[in-house]
Amino acid sequence: MLWAGVPTEASLPALQIEIYYSSPTGRPLPHLAVGRRARNGRARMKTLLIVVHSLTGGARQMAEAACLGASAEPSVQPRLVSAQDARAADVLAADGYVFATPENLAAMAGRMKDFFDRAYYPVLDRINGRPYASLICAGSDGENAARQIARIAIGWRLRVVAAPLIVCTKAQTPEAILAAKTIGSADLDLCRDLGAALAAGLAAGIF
């Protein structure tokens, strides 16, 4: 399910247009808050950077589903990069972003935080207005991790285009928390649709 409890209004433009995309499966997609359309001109290949960290596989499955959805758009090239390997140059080269992480101890994963620490200042004021969305794999909540990413994105002046997509696995015991995760097909469909919607928006030049 989509959760909309994280306040990110500061990252949205004063005037917005809300649009909806239809997915190949017929399910409604999350609405995207977007600015004005780009000027008419020759289309170029856009890049969607998907940065992911996953220890037990849940966030990775979500990121791969988003990547699959984005890959259906011929004019957008999705790049799935681990948080450990992602660099500031990857951020600068991309037109939009998906950040996928588990929530560990009510916070984003340390590897994802390390990525933001390394990339934050080298790209500051150089990626203003680019769109992003976040995917969170959590045991029971996920809001704190989503809120942390939103605060960093506000500092980068990114444009949030969908509410954080949080999947709760209900893992509560140490054994369940450390076990390999399998994300359900319905949740993966939401991740896939989110990737497709973000890619469609990039291709259309609306953000």
Image (cartoon, grey):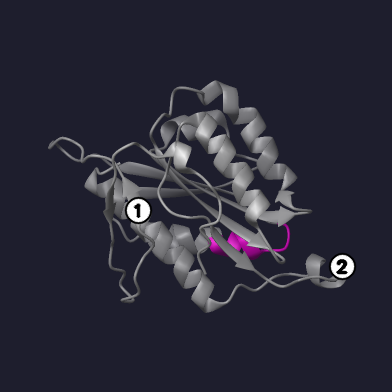
Spot occupied by residue 147 in the image (x, y as percentages of width and height): 61, 46
| Crowd band around label 1 with a 10 angstrom C-alpha radius: few (<14), some (14–19), many (20+) | many
Q: Which residue is drawn at 30% across and 50% down?
A: 201
Asked where in the image residue 184 lies, by quadrant, the reply is: bottom right
Which residue sits furthest left?
Answer: 40
Whether residue 67 is visible here, answered yes or no, is: yes
State the SS at label 1.
Answer: strand
Q: Report, in whole angstroms, how far the alpha carbon at label 1 lies from the one at label 2.
A: 37 Å
Task: For label 2, count other residues whose C-alpha is less than 10 Å away and answer few (under 14), some (14-19) or many (20+).
Answer: few
Look at label 2 and name its amino acid.
Pro
- Residue 176 lies, in percent from the top left, at 80, 72
**Looking at the image, residue 157 lies above or below residue 164:** above
Residues rendered magenta in the picture: 55-62
What amino acid is at disc 1?
A: Leu
Does the magenta segment cover residue 67?
A: no
- In the picture of the structure, the residue carrying the numbered disc 2 is 174
Q: Position of residue 145 (x, y in %)?
A: 65, 50
Q: Which of 52 and 45 is in front in this view?
A: 52
Q: Does the magenta stretch include residue 56?
A: yes
Give the residue number, with chain letter if any, for mark 1: 32
Locate the C terminus and report the quarter of the image it occupies: top left
Residue pictured at 46% horizontal, 71% vertical: 189
